[in-house]
Image: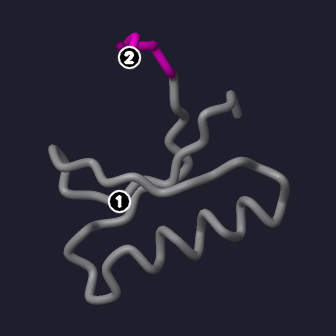
Amino acid sequence: MATPTTQSRTVLERFPAGSPRGSWPAEEYAAAQRAQGRDAHVVMDLGSDQFLAVTDSPQ
């Protein structure tokens, strides 16, 4: 049985989902952050219709 956990995320940057390139700008930003040593990935925020580049570690 899975146990819910509280995980805080820091939003590094927001990108509109309606962009003609979709999530690419967010993915490129996250990749640049990873290249600098920050653990970044992209998630979709359905409520705001945005792609978010986030990190699970504090900034």
Q: Position of residue 36 (x, y in %)?
A: 83, 60
- Say what amino acid the circle numbered 2 marks: Ala
Q: Which residue is mark 2?
A: 2
What residue do we see at 50% from left, 54% from top? 53
Q: Which region shows up in magenta?
A: 1-7
Most common secondary structure along the magenta stretch: loop
What residue do we see at 70% from left, 34% from top? 59
- Say what amino acid the circle numbered 1 marks: Phe
Q: Is residue 12 left or right of residue 15?
A: right
What residue do we see at 27% from left, 48% from top? 45
Q: Position of residue 32 (x, y in %)?
A: 71, 69
Q: Observer-nearest residue: 59 or 31?
A: 31
Q: Position of residue 44 (x, y in %)?
A: 31, 54
Asked whether 27 falls inside the magenta stretch, the response is no
Q: Is residue 52 left or right of residue 20?
A: right
Of the two numbered discs 1 and 2 on the same chain, state the one appearing first in sequence: 2
On screen, residue 30 above or below 11? below
User: What quarter of the picture does the N terminus occupy?
Assistant: top left
What residue do we see at 50% from left, 42% from top? 11
Q: Which residue is mark 1?
A: 51
Identify the residue at the far front of this view.
1
